[in-house]
Amino acid sequence: MLLDIVFVACGLVGLYFGAEWLLRGSVALAWRLAIPTLIVSLVIVGFGTSMPELLVSVRAALSGSSDIALGNVVGSNSANILLIIGVCALISPIIHWDKSVRRDVWMMLAASALLLVLVQFSVIGRLTGLGMAVILFAYLAYTYWQGKQRVEELNADLEPDDIKHESLTPGFTALLILGGLATLFVGAELLVRGSTSLARDFGVSEAVIGLTVVAIGTSLPELATGIMSAMKRHSDIMIGNIIGSNIFNILFILGVTAMLQPISVDPRFGSFDVPIMLAVTVAFAALLLGNLGVRRIVAGLMLIVYAGYTVMLVQV
């Protein structure tokens, strides 16, 4: 148990430094490539910080723990919105952001609705997984092309705080991004390994471990990056981080996992966990599409809802 506690502590340290380096490198890269910060946050930050979920889900599916593989993704998406956006918006309310994120919000909604349909069946098979991955790559290509086409218009909409950047050399920028991602992965792995072992010592089931301990643990790179973004008032990175992560979690992580090993679906996902995830996603989308943003009172409500959802998990 002592070793598990050490893993958790080292994991938290790794997450802090990894998030700081990734944020600095990503903002510098956006300016060097002359593309909006939102696009970089969707692709590099959002998808990059979701790699722990990919590693955990693939490993769990191959070892026969489909509940952990699916619960990891579903739980991470709910945690990304309720926990991470809640915490970040308490630090710095989301008021100004790149409004072209509407396209990505609709994609996040579509991916979440697709997952609700898929979990109504007993298995997510290899062909379905391939189709999900193809959809993601088509979306990425379109996002990059459209971002390059509209770069001048989008950058003109950014707030003064969003356009402050460091002049970093290409090599140092790459080092910050790669080093940040690697440190986040190691930190998340140590934290998940230690916390999962501690949870099993207390007799917690695999489904609940996947939806809570593993889901929150693998979402910690997003949380660390989000907090750092909030402290520096980079709203686009905050939002892109979560939207990109949620899209990547469903289409790529579940897609790749299903291609390697078909995922068995516990009925609870179709009747409880995924409907909750979709409802949370719809609510978050409404705040962005309605140009309402996330102020501190809403952020507080998000955290209360997440606490209630976590308590309910052990009772379902």
Image (cartoon, rainbow, N blue to C red):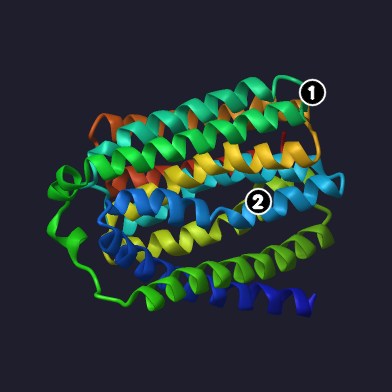
Percent coordinates x, y for residue 131 in the rendering: 63, 28
Residue named by callout 2: 54
Q: Secondary structure at mark 2?
A: helix
Q: Amino acid at mark 2?
A: Leu
Residues packed near mark 1 inside 10 Å, few (<14), some (14 to 19) or many (20 plus) = few
Front residue of 177/88: it is 177
Q: Which quarter of the picture shows residue 12?
A: bottom right
Residue named by callout 1: 122
As displayed, is residue 39 above or below residue 130? Answer: below
Question: Which residue is located at x 72 percent, y 33 percent?
Answer: 316
Q: Secondary structure at mark 1?
A: loop
Nearest to viewer (mark 2 / mark 1): 2
Quadrant of the image containing the N terminus: bottom right
Percent coordinates x, y for residue 278 in the rendering: 52, 29
Question: Which residue is located at x 65 percent, y 49 percent?
Answer: 212
Q: Is residue 143 left or right of residue 199?
A: left
Q: Which quarter of the picture shows residue 195?
A: bottom right
Percent coordinates x, y for residue 248 in the rendering: 54, 43
Question: Which residue is located at x 49 percent, y 71 percent?
Answer: 180
As displayed, is residue 235 above or below residue 153? Answer: below
Residues packed near mark 2 inside 10 Å, few (<14), some (14 to 19) or many (20 plus) = many
Is residue 309 in view from this perspective? yes
Q: Please tell me which of labels 2 and 1 falls first in the chain.
A: 2
- Is the residue under label 1 in contact with that under label 2 (CB below 8 Å)? no
Q: Amino acid at mark 1?
A: Ser
As displayed, is residue 200 above or below residue 82? Answer: below
